Image: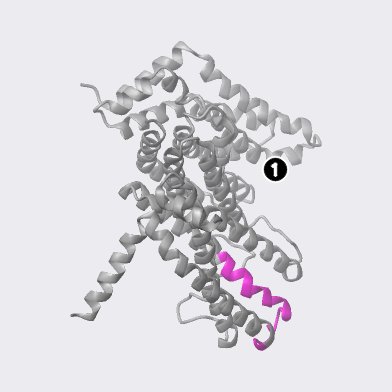
Amino acid sequence: MNPLKSIWNFLSSTYHRLGSPREFYTISQYTTPVFGFLFLALSLFGTYFGLFVAPADYQQGDSFRILFVHVPVAWMSLFVYVVMATAGAIGLIWRMKMAFVVTICSAPIGAAFTALALLTGSIWGKPIWGTYWVWDARLTSELILLFLYFGIMAVYYAFEERKTAEKATALLAVVGVVIVPIIHYSVEWWSSLHQGPTVFVEGGPKMPPEMLLPLAFMAVGFMFFYGYALFLSMQAKVLDNERKSRWVKEIVSDKTR
Amino acid sequence: MKNTLVLYFQREWQLMFRNTSSMIQPLVFFIIIALLFPFSLPAEGALLQKIGGGVIWVSAVLATMLSLESMFHSDYQDGTLEQMLIHPRSLPLAMLGKALAHWTSTGLVLTAFSPILCITFNIPNEQIWVLFSGLMLGTPSLSLIGAIGAALTVTLRRGGVLIAIVILPLYIPILIFGAGMLSQSAQGLEVASQLYALAAILMLSLTLTPFAIAGALRVTIN
Protein backbone atom coordinates (compact mmCIF):
# COMPACT_ATOMS: atom_id res chain seq x y z
CA MET A 1 0.00 0.00 0.00
CA ASN A 2 1.12 3.52 -0.72
CA PRO A 3 2.80 4.76 2.51
CA LEU A 4 1.69 8.36 1.94
CA LYS A 5 -1.87 7.23 1.60
CA SER A 6 -1.74 5.19 4.79
CA ILE A 7 -0.29 8.17 6.68
CA TRP A 8 -3.08 10.36 5.31
CA ASN A 9 -5.69 7.79 6.29
CA PHE A 10 -4.24 7.60 9.78
CA LEU A 11 -4.25 11.40 10.15
CA SER A 12 -7.77 11.80 8.85
CA SER A 13 -9.14 9.02 11.04
CA THR A 14 -7.38 10.53 14.07
CA TYR A 15 -8.88 13.92 13.23
CA HIS A 16 -12.37 12.47 13.02
CA ARG A 17 -11.89 10.47 16.19
CA LEU A 18 -10.80 13.66 17.98
CA GLY A 19 -14.18 15.13 17.03
CA SER A 20 -15.93 12.83 19.49
CA PRO A 21 -15.58 13.78 23.17
CA ARG A 22 -15.13 10.18 24.26
CA GLU A 23 -12.44 9.39 21.68
CA PHE A 24 -10.71 12.67 22.51
CA TYR A 25 -10.66 11.76 26.16
CA THR A 26 -9.12 8.36 25.42
CA ILE A 27 -6.50 9.69 22.99
CA SER A 28 -5.56 12.66 25.16
CA GLN A 29 -4.86 10.30 28.07
CA TYR A 30 -1.79 9.21 26.12
CA THR A 31 -0.76 12.45 24.40
CA THR A 32 -1.03 14.84 27.38
CA PRO A 33 1.90 13.36 29.40
CA VAL A 34 4.00 13.27 26.21
CA PHE A 35 3.33 16.99 25.66
CA GLY A 36 4.17 17.71 29.28
CA PHE A 37 7.43 15.75 29.05
CA LEU A 38 8.46 17.44 25.79
CA PHE A 39 7.72 20.85 27.28
CA LEU A 40 9.86 20.12 30.33
CA ALA A 41 12.75 18.69 28.34
CA LEU A 42 12.82 21.44 25.70
CA SER A 43 12.35 24.33 28.11
CA LEU A 44 14.94 23.02 30.59
CA PHE A 45 17.45 22.65 27.78
CA GLY A 46 16.50 26.07 26.37
CA THR A 47 16.76 27.70 29.81
CA TYR A 48 20.19 26.20 30.48
CA PHE A 49 21.45 27.13 27.02
CA GLY A 50 19.95 30.59 27.21
CA LEU A 51 21.29 31.42 30.67
CA PHE A 52 24.73 29.83 30.58
CA VAL A 53 25.84 29.10 27.03
CA ALA A 54 24.50 32.00 24.94
CA PRO A 55 26.85 35.01 24.95
CA ALA A 56 25.82 38.30 26.54
CA ASP A 57 24.46 40.96 24.20
CA TYR A 58 27.03 43.61 23.28
CA GLN A 59 24.60 46.43 24.09
CA GLN A 60 22.18 45.02 26.63
CA GLY A 61 24.54 42.74 28.58
CA ASP A 62 22.88 39.92 30.47
CA SER A 63 19.51 41.64 30.73
CA PHE A 64 18.65 40.52 27.20
CA ARG A 65 18.31 36.93 28.47
CA ILE A 66 14.67 37.55 29.39
CA LEU A 67 14.15 37.37 25.63
CA PHE A 68 14.10 33.57 25.86
CA VAL A 69 10.85 33.83 27.81
CA HIS A 70 9.44 37.09 26.51
CA VAL A 71 9.58 36.34 22.79
CA PRO A 72 8.11 32.79 22.89
CA VAL A 73 5.38 33.93 25.26
CA ALA A 74 4.51 36.87 23.01
CA TRP A 75 4.42 34.61 19.96
CA MET A 76 2.17 32.21 21.85
CA SER A 77 -0.23 35.00 22.83
CA LEU A 78 -0.98 35.47 19.13
CA PHE A 79 -0.69 31.79 18.18
CA VAL A 80 -3.26 30.77 20.81
CA TYR A 81 -5.61 33.45 19.53
CA VAL A 82 -5.34 32.17 15.97
CA VAL A 83 -5.94 28.56 17.12
CA MET A 84 -8.87 29.73 19.24
CA ALA A 85 -10.50 31.68 16.41
CA THR A 86 -9.87 28.91 13.85
CA ALA A 87 -11.45 26.37 16.19
CA GLY A 88 -14.34 28.78 16.71
CA ALA A 89 -14.87 29.10 12.96
CA ILE A 90 -14.72 25.29 12.55
CA GLY A 91 -17.26 24.93 15.34
CA LEU A 92 -19.64 27.48 13.82
CA ILE A 93 -19.37 26.11 10.28
CA TRP A 94 -19.27 22.34 10.85
CA ARG A 95 -21.00 22.30 14.27
CA MET A 96 -18.17 20.31 15.79
CA LYS A 97 -18.58 19.90 19.54
CA MET A 98 -14.89 19.56 20.29
CA ALA A 99 -13.95 22.70 18.34
CA PHE A 100 -15.94 24.82 20.81
CA VAL A 101 -14.15 23.12 23.67
CA VAL A 102 -10.81 24.09 22.07
CA THR A 103 -11.99 27.72 21.78
CA ILE A 104 -13.22 27.98 25.35
CA CYS A 105 -10.27 26.20 26.93
CA SER A 106 -7.76 28.23 24.91
CA ALA A 107 -9.01 31.62 26.15
CA PRO A 108 -7.58 31.50 29.72
CA ILE A 109 -4.30 30.02 28.48
CA GLY A 110 -3.98 32.73 25.82
CA ALA A 111 -4.82 35.40 28.40
CA ALA A 112 -2.07 34.02 30.66
CA PHE A 113 0.45 34.08 27.82
CA THR A 114 -0.55 37.66 26.98
CA ALA A 115 -0.26 38.77 30.60
CA LEU A 116 3.16 37.11 30.84
CA ALA A 117 4.31 38.78 27.63
CA LEU A 118 3.30 42.17 29.06
CA LEU A 119 4.90 41.42 32.42
CA THR A 120 8.23 40.13 31.08
CA GLY A 121 8.24 42.96 28.55
CA SER A 122 7.92 45.62 31.22
CA ILE A 123 10.60 43.94 33.37
CA TRP A 124 12.85 44.01 30.32
CA GLY A 125 11.85 47.57 29.46
CA LYS A 126 12.94 49.03 32.80
CA PRO A 127 16.74 48.54 32.36
CA ILE A 128 16.77 49.02 28.58
CA TRP A 129 14.19 51.73 27.88
CA GLY A 130 14.30 53.22 31.37
CA THR A 131 10.58 52.70 31.89
CA TYR A 132 8.20 49.86 32.66
CA TRP A 133 5.57 51.02 30.27
CA VAL A 134 5.12 53.28 27.25
CA TRP A 135 1.87 53.88 25.38
CA ASP A 136 3.26 52.65 22.17
CA ALA A 137 1.62 50.71 19.35
CA ARG A 138 2.97 47.23 20.12
CA LEU A 139 2.39 47.43 23.87
CA THR A 140 -1.03 48.98 23.52
CA SER A 141 -2.23 46.43 20.99
CA GLU A 142 -0.97 43.56 23.15
CA LEU A 143 -2.97 45.05 26.01
CA ILE A 144 -6.03 45.16 23.74
CA LEU A 145 -5.47 41.47 23.06
CA LEU A 146 -5.53 40.77 26.79
CA PHE A 147 -8.86 42.55 27.15
CA LEU A 148 -10.21 40.72 24.13
CA TYR A 149 -9.39 37.43 25.86
CA PHE A 150 -11.19 38.72 28.96
CA GLY A 151 -14.21 39.69 26.84
CA ILE A 152 -14.33 36.23 25.27
CA MET A 153 -14.25 34.56 28.68
CA ALA A 154 -16.88 36.98 30.00
CA VAL A 155 -19.25 36.14 27.13
CA TYR A 156 -18.93 32.40 27.76
CA TYR A 157 -19.81 32.72 31.42
CA ALA A 158 -22.64 35.21 30.81
CA PHE A 159 -24.94 32.72 29.10
CA GLU A 160 -26.82 30.10 31.07
CA GLU A 161 -27.34 27.67 28.23
CA ARG A 162 -24.08 26.05 27.19
CA LYS A 163 -24.76 25.67 23.47
CA THR A 164 -25.59 29.37 23.07
CA ALA A 165 -22.57 30.34 25.16
CA GLU A 166 -20.26 28.22 23.01
CA LYS A 167 -21.51 29.70 19.75
CA ALA A 168 -21.48 33.28 21.03
CA THR A 169 -17.91 32.84 22.30
CA ALA A 170 -16.78 31.35 19.00
CA LEU A 171 -18.38 34.20 17.06
CA LEU A 172 -16.65 36.85 19.16
CA ALA A 173 -13.33 35.02 18.79
CA VAL A 174 -13.73 35.06 15.00
CA VAL A 175 -14.69 38.77 14.97
CA GLY A 176 -11.67 39.63 17.12
CA VAL A 177 -9.24 38.13 14.59
CA VAL A 178 -8.84 41.64 13.12
CA ILE A 179 -6.69 42.49 16.14
CA VAL A 180 -4.02 39.88 15.34
CA PRO A 181 -2.60 41.49 12.18
CA ILE A 182 -2.75 44.90 13.88
CA ILE A 183 -0.48 43.62 16.68
CA HIS A 184 1.77 41.78 14.29
CA TYR A 185 2.39 44.75 12.01
CA SER A 186 2.18 47.49 14.63
CA VAL A 187 5.96 47.62 14.91
CA GLU A 188 6.28 48.19 11.18
CA TRP A 189 3.32 50.53 10.69
CA TRP A 190 3.88 52.95 13.54
CA SER A 191 7.14 54.29 14.83
CA SER A 192 7.63 52.35 18.01
CA LEU A 193 10.05 52.03 20.89
CA HIS A 194 9.69 48.26 20.62
CA GLN A 195 12.29 46.69 18.36
CA GLY A 196 11.28 45.46 14.92
CA PRO A 197 11.12 41.84 13.81
CA THR A 198 14.50 40.12 14.24
CA VAL A 199 13.87 36.43 13.68
CA PHE A 200 11.48 36.05 10.76
CA VAL A 201 12.93 38.61 8.35
CA GLU A 202 14.14 38.54 4.78
CA GLY A 203 17.67 37.22 4.49
CA GLY A 204 17.48 35.09 7.63
CA PRO A 205 17.43 35.95 11.32
CA LYS A 206 19.56 38.87 12.53
CA MET A 207 20.72 36.89 15.52
CA PRO A 208 23.72 34.62 16.17
CA PRO A 209 22.97 30.85 16.20
CA GLU A 210 23.92 30.57 19.90
CA MET A 211 21.01 32.86 20.73
CA LEU A 212 18.68 31.49 18.07
CA LEU A 213 18.97 27.88 19.23
CA PRO A 214 17.72 28.37 22.83
CA LEU A 215 15.02 30.69 21.49
CA ALA A 216 13.83 27.97 19.11
CA PHE A 217 13.88 25.38 21.92
CA MET A 218 11.88 27.65 24.19
CA ALA A 219 9.41 28.52 21.43
CA VAL A 220 8.73 24.86 20.58
CA GLY A 221 8.71 23.97 24.28
CA PHE A 222 6.05 26.61 25.00
CA MET A 223 4.04 25.27 22.07
CA PHE A 224 4.01 21.90 23.82
CA PHE A 225 3.10 23.59 27.07
CA TYR A 226 0.07 25.06 25.32
CA GLY A 227 -0.84 21.58 24.06
CA TYR A 228 -0.37 20.17 27.56
CA ALA A 229 -2.39 22.85 29.34
CA LEU A 230 -5.06 22.83 26.63
CA PHE A 231 -5.53 19.06 26.73
CA LEU A 232 -5.68 18.97 30.52
CA SER A 233 -8.27 21.71 30.60
CA MET A 234 -10.18 20.12 27.69
CA GLN A 235 -10.30 16.79 29.53
CA ALA A 236 -11.91 18.46 32.51
CA LYS A 237 -14.30 20.37 30.27
CA VAL A 238 -15.30 17.26 28.31
CA LEU A 239 -16.05 15.35 31.50
CA ASP A 240 -18.13 18.27 32.73
CA ASN A 241 -19.98 18.73 29.42
CA GLU A 242 -20.75 15.02 29.04
CA ARG A 243 -21.39 14.33 32.71
CA LYS A 244 -24.77 12.76 31.94
CA SER A 245 -23.37 10.20 29.52
CA ARG A 246 -22.62 6.65 30.57
CA TRP A 247 -18.89 6.60 29.69
CA VAL A 248 -18.18 9.57 31.95
CA LYS A 249 -20.09 7.93 34.80
CA GLU A 250 -18.00 4.78 34.31
CA ILE A 251 -14.72 6.75 34.35
CA VAL A 252 -15.72 8.69 37.43
CA SER A 253 -16.85 5.59 39.31
CA ASP A 254 -13.59 3.84 38.34
CA LYS A 255 -11.50 6.71 39.64
CA THR A 256 -13.40 7.16 42.89
CA ARG A 257 -13.56 3.46 43.72
CA MET B 1 -41.42 45.41 -2.91
CA LYS B 2 -39.10 47.90 -1.25
CA ASN B 3 -35.40 47.24 -0.79
CA THR B 4 -34.74 45.57 2.57
CA LEU B 5 -32.08 48.09 3.51
CA VAL B 6 -34.31 51.10 2.80
CA LEU B 7 -37.27 49.49 4.48
CA TYR B 8 -35.49 48.80 7.74
CA PHE B 9 -33.79 52.20 7.71
CA GLN B 10 -37.17 53.90 7.34
CA ARG B 11 -38.73 51.75 10.04
CA GLU B 12 -36.00 52.72 12.51
CA TRP B 13 -36.42 56.37 11.62
CA GLN B 14 -40.15 56.24 12.19
CA LEU B 15 -39.63 54.61 15.57
CA MET B 16 -37.02 57.20 16.47
CA PHE B 17 -39.23 60.15 15.58
CA ARG B 18 -42.07 58.76 17.66
CA ASN B 19 -39.71 58.58 20.63
CA THR B 20 -37.37 61.52 20.23
CA SER B 21 -35.79 61.07 23.65
CA SER B 22 -33.79 58.14 22.24
CA MET B 23 -32.18 60.61 19.86
CA ILE B 24 -31.51 63.33 22.41
CA GLN B 25 -30.12 61.12 25.19
CA PRO B 26 -26.84 60.11 23.48
CA LEU B 27 -26.18 63.73 22.53
CA VAL B 28 -26.76 64.99 26.07
CA PHE B 29 -24.60 62.19 27.45
CA PHE B 30 -21.88 63.06 24.94
CA ILE B 31 -21.82 66.72 25.96
CA ILE B 32 -21.89 65.94 29.70
CA ILE B 33 -18.98 63.48 29.46
CA ALA B 34 -16.91 65.96 27.47
CA LEU B 35 -17.66 68.74 29.94
CA LEU B 36 -16.63 66.64 32.94
CA PHE B 37 -13.01 67.00 31.85
CA PRO B 38 -12.67 70.79 32.12
CA PHE B 39 -14.24 70.54 35.59
CA SER B 40 -11.87 67.83 36.80
CA LEU B 41 -8.64 69.19 35.31
CA PRO B 42 -6.74 72.42 35.98
CA ALA B 43 -8.48 75.16 33.98
CA GLU B 44 -5.58 75.99 31.68
CA GLY B 45 -6.47 76.90 28.13
CA ALA B 46 -3.38 75.25 26.65
CA LEU B 47 -4.00 71.92 28.40
CA LEU B 48 -7.66 71.77 27.36
CA GLN B 49 -6.72 72.65 23.80
CA LYS B 50 -4.24 69.79 23.79
CA ILE B 51 -6.53 67.10 25.18
CA GLY B 52 -9.81 68.40 23.73
CA GLY B 53 -9.77 66.20 20.62
CA GLY B 54 -9.08 63.03 22.60
CA VAL B 55 -11.78 63.93 25.12
CA ILE B 56 -14.33 64.43 22.34
CA TRP B 57 -13.40 61.07 20.78
CA VAL B 58 -13.69 59.22 24.09
CA SER B 59 -17.03 60.89 24.76
CA ALA B 60 -18.28 59.86 21.32
CA VAL B 61 -17.20 56.26 21.90
CA LEU B 62 -18.90 56.16 25.32
CA ALA B 63 -22.08 57.81 24.06
CA THR B 64 -22.31 55.33 21.18
CA MET B 65 -21.68 52.42 23.51
CA LEU B 66 -24.34 53.52 25.95
CA SER B 67 -26.96 53.68 23.21
CA LEU B 68 -26.12 50.18 21.94
CA GLU B 69 -27.98 48.33 24.65
CA SER B 70 -31.33 49.64 23.46
CA MET B 71 -30.57 48.86 19.81
CA PHE B 72 -32.25 45.44 19.73
CA HIS B 73 -33.87 45.51 23.14
CA SER B 74 -37.42 46.64 22.35
CA ASP B 75 -37.50 44.53 19.19
CA TYR B 76 -36.51 41.51 21.25
CA GLN B 77 -39.06 42.29 23.98
CA ASP B 78 -42.06 42.51 21.64
CA GLY B 79 -41.01 39.61 19.42
CA THR B 80 -40.25 41.69 16.31
CA LEU B 81 -36.69 40.40 16.25
CA GLU B 82 -37.84 36.78 15.99
CA GLN B 83 -40.09 37.76 13.08
CA MET B 84 -37.09 39.37 11.37
CA LEU B 85 -35.12 36.16 11.83
CA ILE B 86 -37.74 33.89 10.25
CA HIS B 87 -38.64 36.37 7.50
CA PRO B 88 -37.31 35.48 4.02
CA ARG B 89 -35.76 38.95 3.59
CA SER B 90 -31.99 39.13 3.88
CA LEU B 91 -31.10 39.48 7.56
CA PRO B 92 -27.62 41.03 7.01
CA LEU B 93 -29.14 43.78 4.83
CA ALA B 94 -31.83 44.42 7.42
CA MET B 95 -29.16 44.68 10.11
CA LEU B 96 -27.13 47.07 7.96
CA GLY B 97 -30.21 49.30 7.69
CA LYS B 98 -30.73 49.12 11.43
CA ALA B 99 -27.11 49.91 12.24
CA LEU B 100 -27.01 52.83 9.80
CA ALA B 101 -30.20 54.24 11.29
CA HIS B 102 -28.58 53.87 14.72
CA TRP B 103 -25.61 55.87 13.44
CA THR B 104 -27.81 58.72 12.17
CA SER B 105 -29.37 59.02 15.63
CA THR B 106 -26.07 58.85 17.55
CA GLY B 107 -22.80 59.25 15.64
CA LEU B 108 -24.10 61.70 13.06
CA VAL B 109 -25.76 63.89 15.69
CA LEU B 110 -22.62 63.84 17.85
CA THR B 111 -20.41 64.68 14.89
CA ALA B 112 -22.67 67.56 13.88
CA PHE B 113 -22.48 68.93 17.40
CA SER B 114 -18.73 68.35 17.89
CA PRO B 115 -17.56 71.73 16.41
CA ILE B 116 -19.40 73.56 19.19
CA LEU B 117 -17.60 71.47 21.81
CA CYS B 118 -14.33 72.16 19.99
CA ILE B 119 -14.90 75.88 20.42
CA THR B 120 -15.38 75.45 24.18
CA PHE B 121 -12.06 73.58 24.27
CA ASN B 122 -10.36 76.41 22.30
CA ILE B 123 -9.42 74.03 19.48
CA PRO B 124 -8.17 76.01 16.44
CA ASN B 125 -10.40 76.14 13.36
CA GLU B 126 -8.30 73.97 11.05
CA GLN B 127 -8.25 71.22 13.65
CA ILE B 128 -12.02 71.40 14.05
CA TRP B 129 -12.25 70.21 10.43
CA VAL B 130 -9.78 67.42 11.10
CA LEU B 131 -11.81 66.25 14.08
CA PHE B 132 -15.08 66.60 12.20
CA SER B 133 -13.94 64.52 9.22
CA GLY B 134 -12.41 61.92 11.52
CA LEU B 135 -15.65 61.56 13.49
CA MET B 136 -17.65 61.46 10.26
CA LEU B 137 -15.60 58.47 9.04
CA GLY B 138 -15.14 56.79 12.42
CA THR B 139 -18.55 56.91 14.10
CA PRO B 140 -20.38 54.73 11.50
CA SER B 141 -17.85 51.98 12.22
CA LEU B 142 -18.57 52.41 15.94
CA SER B 143 -22.28 51.75 15.35
CA LEU B 144 -21.65 48.81 13.00
CA ILE B 145 -19.09 47.06 15.22
CA GLY B 146 -21.07 47.88 18.35
CA ALA B 147 -24.15 46.24 16.86
CA ILE B 148 -22.32 42.89 17.00
CA GLY B 149 -21.93 43.29 20.75
CA ALA B 150 -25.54 44.42 21.10
CA ALA B 151 -26.71 41.37 19.13
CA LEU B 152 -24.59 38.99 21.21
CA THR B 153 -25.94 40.30 24.50
CA VAL B 154 -29.58 41.04 23.59
CA THR B 155 -31.00 38.05 25.48
CA LEU B 156 -29.02 38.73 28.64
CA ARG B 157 -30.67 40.59 31.49
CA ARG B 158 -27.58 42.61 32.34
CA GLY B 159 -25.95 43.01 28.96
CA GLY B 160 -24.74 46.59 29.40
CA VAL B 161 -21.45 45.92 31.15
CA LEU B 162 -20.76 42.92 28.94
CA ILE B 163 -21.22 45.05 25.79
CA ALA B 164 -18.55 47.39 27.12
CA ILE B 165 -16.09 44.57 27.86
CA VAL B 166 -16.65 42.95 24.49
CA ILE B 167 -16.79 46.01 22.27
CA LEU B 168 -14.33 48.52 23.74
CA PRO B 169 -11.22 46.50 22.76
CA LEU B 170 -12.51 46.44 19.18
CA TYR B 171 -13.06 50.22 19.28
CA ILE B 172 -9.48 51.02 20.27
CA PRO B 173 -7.96 50.94 16.74
CA ILE B 174 -10.58 53.48 15.58
CA LEU B 175 -9.85 55.61 18.62
CA ILE B 176 -6.09 55.44 17.97
CA PHE B 177 -6.45 56.60 14.36
CA GLY B 178 -9.14 59.20 15.12
CA ALA B 179 -7.43 60.81 18.09
CA GLY B 180 -3.95 60.31 16.63
CA MET B 181 -5.01 62.45 13.69
CA LEU B 182 -5.42 65.45 15.94
CA SER B 183 -2.02 65.26 17.58
CA GLN B 184 -0.51 64.87 14.10
CA SER B 185 -2.24 67.94 12.74
CA ALA B 186 -1.34 69.91 15.88
CA GLN B 187 2.29 69.34 14.91
CA GLY B 188 1.54 70.51 11.39
CA LEU B 189 1.79 67.03 9.85
CA GLU B 190 -0.38 65.46 7.15
CA VAL B 191 -3.39 63.50 8.39
CA ALA B 192 -4.34 61.79 5.11
CA SER B 193 -2.96 58.38 6.16
CA GLN B 194 -5.15 58.27 9.27
CA LEU B 195 -8.18 59.34 7.24
CA TYR B 196 -7.48 56.53 4.78
CA ALA B 197 -7.15 54.06 7.67
CA LEU B 198 -10.48 55.19 9.13
CA ALA B 199 -12.07 54.93 5.68
CA ALA B 200 -10.65 51.42 5.25
CA ILE B 201 -12.04 50.37 8.63
CA LEU B 202 -15.41 51.84 7.61
CA MET B 203 -15.42 49.91 4.32
CA LEU B 204 -14.58 46.65 6.13
CA SER B 205 -17.26 47.37 8.73
CA LEU B 206 -19.90 48.15 6.10
CA THR B 207 -19.25 44.94 4.20
CA LEU B 208 -18.47 42.43 6.98
CA THR B 209 -20.24 43.44 10.19
CA PRO B 210 -23.82 42.92 8.82
CA PHE B 211 -23.02 39.21 8.51
CA ALA B 212 -21.51 39.10 11.99
CA ILE B 213 -24.57 40.90 13.46
CA ALA B 214 -26.93 38.50 11.69
CA GLY B 215 -24.82 35.55 12.84
CA ALA B 216 -24.81 36.79 16.42
CA LEU B 217 -28.60 37.13 16.43
CA ARG B 218 -29.04 33.63 15.02
CA VAL B 219 -26.75 32.29 17.74
CA THR B 220 -28.36 34.04 20.69
CA ILE B 221 -32.03 33.87 19.73
CA ASN B 222 -33.36 30.34 19.41
Does A75 appear above or below A81? Answer: below
Query: Can you see residue A247?
Result: yes
Instruction: Determine the residue positioned at 63% across, 69% down.
Output: A70
Q: What's the magenta bit mostly, secondary-structure-wise?
A: helix
Q: Is residue B131 left or right of residue A181?
A: right
The residue at the far top in this view is: B18
Residue A141 locus on image (x, y percent): 57, 55
Q: In the displayed image of the protein, which residue is found farthest to the right?
A: B42
Quadrant of the drawing holding the C terminus of chain A: bottom right
Give the mark count: 1
Can the viewer see residue A88 in this picture?
no
Please identify the quarter of the rendering in which residue B97 is found.
top left
If the image is split into quadrants, where does the N terminus of chain A sit? bottom left
Image location (x, y in percent) of residue B80: 37, 20
* Residue most extreme to the left: A1
Vertical arrangement, residue A217 with respect to residue B181, above or below: below
* Magenta span contains residue A57: yes
Q: Secondary structure at mark 1?
A: helix
Q: Position of residue A250 (x, y in %)?
A: 45, 53
Is residue A195 found inside the magenta-colored segment of the image? no
> Foreground: B217 or A91?
A91
Task: Name the residue at 67% across, 65% down.
Answer: A121
Q: From which residue to which does the magenta span run?
A: A53-74
Counting from the top left corner in percent of width and height, residue B164 is at 57, 37
Q: Residue at x 66, y 88 (%)?
A: A53
Task: Report the side of A117 relative to A128 (left or right).
Answer: left
